[in-house]
Amino acid sequence: VQLQASGGGLVQAGGSLRLSCAVSGSTFSNYALGWHRQGPGKRREWVASIGSDGRTNHASAVKGRFTISRDNAKKMLYLQMNSLKPEDTAVYYCSENGYELRSPPHYWGQGTLVTVSS
């Protein structure tokens, strides 16, 4: 299974970005997927998950600003990020998880850098 994240970049505070993650080598639709991030000097943290049935869960720090979604036909995972804040600056990683919404990651993408300027 391979995951390729893209869409990161430099954006001003208050702006928006959409991250994408292409998944290959997987049955994809059977599994939950997730986004995670690691800011400068911080540990990696979970951002959002989406189940095979489309149910979602978002971390409190991003709830109401970020939205995770998936396209099973295209084997794509997305993260729409609105109202970005400087503290959202991080490398963002996508993951393919287990069968359940809250299952842990099994595979990771390489990460894409998001920088939010104040």
Image: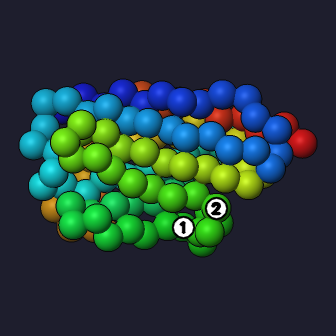
Residue labelled with disc 1: 59
Image quadrant in which you'd find residue 53: bottom left
Q: Is residue 84 left or right of residue 68?
A: right
The amino acid pointed to by label 1 is Ala
Q: Is residue 86 left or right of residue 92?
A: right
Residue at image position (73%, 50%) is: 84
Residue at image position (39%, 54%) is: 69
Element on which disc 1 rests = loop
Rendering coords of residue 59 (x, y %):
54, 67
Whether residue 46 is visible to the viewer of this picture, yes or no, is no
Mark 1: few, some, or many residues within 10 Å (few <14, many ≥20)? Answer: some
Q: CA distance from mark 1 to mark 2?
A: 10 Å
Q: Quadrant of the C terminus?
A: top right
Residue 48: mark in rendering? none
Of labels 1 and 2, earlier in sequence is 1
Residue at image position (64%, 61%) is: 65
Rendering coords of residue 44 (x, y %):
53, 48
Say whether marks 1 and 2 touch (CB < 8 Å).
no
Element on which disc 2 rests = loop
The amino acid pointed to by label 2 is Arg
Rendering coords of residue 114 (x, y %):
65, 35
Residue 65: mark in rendering? 2
Q: Is residue 100 above or below residue 90?
A: below
